[in-house]
Image (cartoon, rainbow, N blue to C red):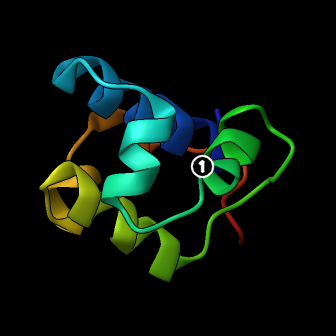
Amino acid sequence: MNMSEATRIRIQELIDERGTNVSDLSLKSNLTPSVLYDFMKGKTKTLNSFTLKKICYGAGITLKEFYDREYFNNFDDVVK
């Protein structure tokens, strides 16, 4: 797993936990839905930290809570 895959998994978890969808989360995050749709479909490979912070705001969590998952501790794409 790489960072982008882990981020997609976490965003999907947030969507599922809240019983919402990509479009609603995008709007609550002050993003156009295409930003999140493109990332979730893999069309966009990464999200910048500002966009991720907006997603956290829209989901009502902090960045710390976003990254508080074990799968963020093990990546195949770690820079050495």
User: Which residue is rendered at x = 64% and y = 32% of the image?
Assistant: 1
44 is higher (above) or lower (below) than 53: above
Q: What residue is disc 1 on?
A: 33
In this rendering, the count of numbered labels is 1
Residue 11 occupies which quadrant of the picture? top left
Residue 29 occupies which quadrant of the picture? bottom left
24 is higher (above) or lower (below) than 51: above
Looking at the rendered structure, the kind of residue marked 1 is Pro
Q: Is residue 44 left or right of residue 39?
A: right
Secondary structure under the numbered disc 1 in the rendered image: helix
Is residue 2 visible in the rendered image? The answer is: no
Where residue 60 appears, as percent x and y from the top left, is 12, 55
User: Which residue is rendered at x = 76% and y = 31% of the image?
Assistant: 41
Where residue 5 appears, as percent x and y from the top left, is 63, 36
Q: Is residue 22 left or right of residue 32?
A: left
Quarter occupied by the C terminus: bottom right
